[in-house]
Amino acid sequence: MKTFLRLPVCGILLAAAACGDSSDGLDAQAWAESDIGAVESASEALGAAPSGYGFAPVMTSGDTAPGGGTVYYSFHADQLTQDGDVIFSTWLENLGAGFYRTNDGALELLGRAGDEAPGDVKYGVCMSWYSGSMNEAGDSTFGFFIDGIPTEGRPSGGNTGTFRVDSDGVKTALLLPDTTLAPNGKPFHGTTLRTSINNKGDVVFHGIIETDEGIHMPSEEYHGLGMGVFMADSDNTIKSLVSPGDPAPGGGTFDFAENAFMNERGDVAFGAHVAGEECRLLGHSQAQRIFCGESVYLRKKDGTITSIAHQDDAAPGGGTYRLAFGPVLNNRGDILFIGDLTPAPDLFTSLGVFLHRRGKTVAVARPGDAMPGGGNLVSASGYISGYDLSDNGQVVFFAQLDTDEDGDTKPDTGIYAWRNEVVHLIARTGTQIPNLGTVQKVANGSGYGITNNNSGQVAIPVHLTDGKKALVIATPQY
């Protein structure tokens, strides 16, 4: 999850972006002719908005959450299953963070600040953002701060563990900082950003490890830690997929890897940096957060690694990528990612959405594009949960717009779907959601916490003009 937009959570600098499935071969046309009809009858009971979507709330601020506590702050949707169940996080008044999932529409608590966690630890006040994942069986993983581990002297994620909750509610600790051994025989020193679980129960996650091959900045003393991508099977046996010191395609070695996403075949898309290339970052030291602005790669199950989009590569439609980051991989091998088109020497002000499929990269949406419903795209999300990709090739994404139709002095925001190479509006500032209210901003205004499934449904956090916050499922009615 994501790295240039910096979100201070509980005193930790968390990066937001680069910075963070079963129908192989099904194309968008086949989906349009089959899957949409399957959801039309289900959507009849939903309140319809002019965008052609019905909206059903999952949880709203003021609700009493499962396990206790009152919801009072924003939502973050992590993954939406084909049955419409969702794993998400939110904040509870006077308690802290909580992770939840729905099971046939019923809400279940996964983990909450102050609760006992597996591994004889307690969950801390905060979740690790952009970290939840759930497979079709309901097996779930997420990251959570651990109570009692100090943040001082540790890079971001150094006090964070990764946990697994199976469909029956059995909980295990997949990674505990300073306890769980990495494949190099030394303990992990934390984890960051998202996890990814497939239907076999394999989990891809990011681990902070002891290594001499991490990011060496000339102006900083090397702290002996690096970030890599790892996989734990259903028995929690851990292996390295990409670690500092591993060879990169085209020559050189990786000194950093994160932002991994796995499909059912066991292929993994990830972001990484090659030692010796320019380290593009925004104002933080490696002691604060282990990171170098990244490029996008694909690691096949057999271990072969291919470059998909590299910093300074030409971007479709013009310009070059200052960065390419946050890949999402579907089961037919399509890779969705964000490309930073900001003119040098700046970063992270002009972001576009790109899709790599059948060996070619196309632009889904670029800054300056006209958006349906009004306004032009200023920038896509810098958060790795500000966009998603279904197995049938539908893309959903967040957009900051160049309009201010509600006159609140803040840019309007919207969520859009791209299918059959056409962009469609789902919800934006000013959208009326029956029985809920008028949307002030979507995806928390900053562009994080949306996800979709093969039926075209989209989970979206919305802030309403009356001050309420809600997590809603948007279902197409076309």
Image: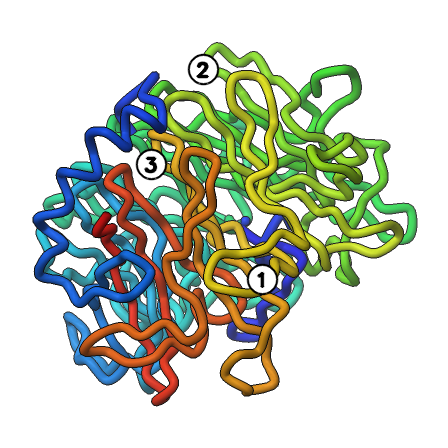
Residue 429 figure quarter: bottom left
Of the pair 305 and 149, the residue shown nearer to us: 305
Q: Residue at x 79, y 48 (%)?
A: 280
Residue 231 appearing in the image: yes
CB-based contact (under 8 Å), mark 2 and mark 3: no
Looking at the image, how many numbered discs can be counted on the residues?
A: 3
Label 2 to label 1: alpha-carbon separation = 30 Å
**Rendered location of residue 419, percent (x, y):** 41, 38
Q: Residue at x 79, y 62 (%)?
A: 283
Q: Amino acid at mark 2?
A: Lys
Label 2 to label 3: alpha-carbon separation = 15 Å
From the image, tell me which residue sits under label 1: 14
Q: Amino acid at mark 1?
A: Leu
Q: Residue at x 75, y 39 (%)?
A: 321
Label 3 to label 1: alpha-carbon separation = 22 Å
- Whichever of labels 3 and 1 marks the residue nearer the N terminus, that label is 1
Picture disc at residue 301: 2
Q: Amino acid at mark 3?
A: Ile
**Rendered location of residue 153, percent (x, y):** 66, 63
- Whichever of labels 2 and 1 marks the residue nearer the N terminus, that label is 1
Of the pair 389 and 278, the residue shown nearer to us: 389
Of the pair 451 and 456, the residue shown nearer to us: 456
CB-based contact (under 8 Å), mark 3 and mark 1: no
From the image, tell me which residue sits under label 3: 197
Q: Which SS class for mark 1?
A: strand
165 relative to 158 in the view: left or right: left
